[in-house]
Image: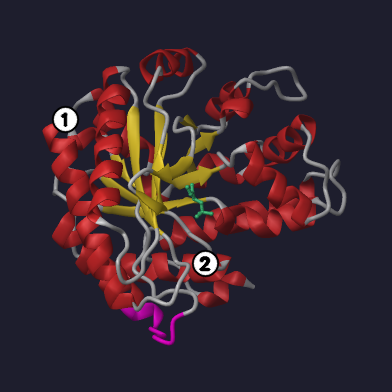
Amino acid sequence: MSELNKIALKILEKGRGILAADESNGTMTKRLEGVKILSTPENRLLFRETLFSASGMTKYIGGVILYDETIRQKTSKNRMIPELISEMGSTPGIKVDTGAKVLAGSPNEKITEGLDGLRERLKEYYKLGARFTKWRGVYSISKNYPSKLSIQSNAHALARYSALVQETNMVPIVEPELLMDGEHSSRECFSKTSEVIKKCFEELILHKVDLKGILLKPNMILSGNKSKDKISNEEVAKLTLKCLKNSVPSEVPGIAFLSGGQSEIEATENLDLINKYNDTDFIMSFSYGRALQQSALKYWSKDIHNSEGSQQIFNHRAKMNALAAQGKWSKDLEN
Ligand code: 13P
């Protein structure tokens, strides 16, 4: 077993998943202002340290994706953040793209940037303790989108990123996110997600990326949030499995879904059903941002120096998702 394959499997072992705490300062400011907290480096750290030192980290969270600011910060006990994460039994990771910008040639779409100077940045992140990374390509769905140009160019960037990350002995998370925003049906989400993922693997293979040493972070197959096409959670699970079975090579050790704007319970329930129906060899787990943090953040905002209550809320969500990653969740466990 290669070193990278071992890291990937360890992150997702025994139902564990990933905490995506890599919101850029811009996104984190929106989240904090949403609960009336001033977005300062100190407050961003305080909330994140609250989560990273919660007891649920040890059993349920195998990896934490950090943002550049956070990986360089020190805890209240004067330890580096990646050290705290490792001590909790989890693996530190880092978002390495520099964000999605307007795609020249198709101005309604985005291309993710960050390849220039990436090799040097990766070496520094490795020294700071990171053992896996994330890069997110983002696509909107409508009649003409995502375009061939966006599918091709984002797949190319994801592959070049992955090759560089593996060269630095870290596991790349490959994240092509087709957004939930819009009027599209679940069928459209299914066909476009399949096309995007297939193109990503075509490019990953071309760039000689070791597929056993990556993790895929896809969206689930959902209908658009403004769509009339409402489908059941069972259908979400079945369509998601069908899409991944047809588009992901069997070497890939694990798939960790993003929550993408689903409610906390919805994201857990869908993951649970995916695992109840899972007839593949892929580990199917979570790499949630909002669906792991929303309630904890709301509670924390009432008294930011009292960490206990928000840690309990976070521990519960982490546990529910870890059960869902094994198909062992049920609604009555939520009470
Ligand atoms: P959400 O789970 O909130 O979609 O965030 C996951 C993520 O990392 C998006 O890039």
Q: Quadrant of residue 184?
A: bottom left
Residue beneath the point at 87% across and 49% down: 303
Q: Nearer the viewer, residue 198 or 78?
A: 198
Q: Give the distance between the C-alpha atoms of the residues marked 1 and 2, in whole angstroms.
A: 33 Å
Residue beneath the point at 27% across and 73% down: 239
Residue 60 at x, y = what percent? 50, 47
Q: How many numbered marks have been drawn onto this rendered protein structure?
A: 2
Q: Name the element at disc 1.
A: loop
* For discs 1 and 2, the disc positioned in front in the rendered view: 1
Q: Quadrant of residue 182?
A: bottom left
Q: Which mark is residue 207?
A: 1
Boundaries of the magenta span: 227-235
Residue 102 at x, y = what percent? 44, 45
Amino acid type at image mark 2: Gln
Residue 317 at x, y = what percent? 58, 58
Q: Is residue 102 left or right of residue 291?
A: left
Q: Quadrant of residue 55?
A: top right
Q: Earlier in the sequence, mark 1 or mark 2?
A: 1
Judged by its main secondary structure, the magenta piece is: loop
Q: Is residue 84 magenta?
A: no
Q: Residues within 10 Å of mark 1 (few under 14, many from 20)?
A: some
Q: Is residue 167 visible?
A: yes
Q: Which mark is residue 262?
A: 2
258 lies above or below 269: above
In this view, the residue farthest toward the front is 105
Residue beneath the point at 71% across and 40% down: 50
Label pair 1/2, CB-CB below 8 angstroms: no
Q: Nearer the viewer, residue 153 or 325?
A: 153
252 lies above or below 170: below
- Classify the position of the C terminus by image quarter: bottom right
Q: How is the image coloured?
A: secondary structure
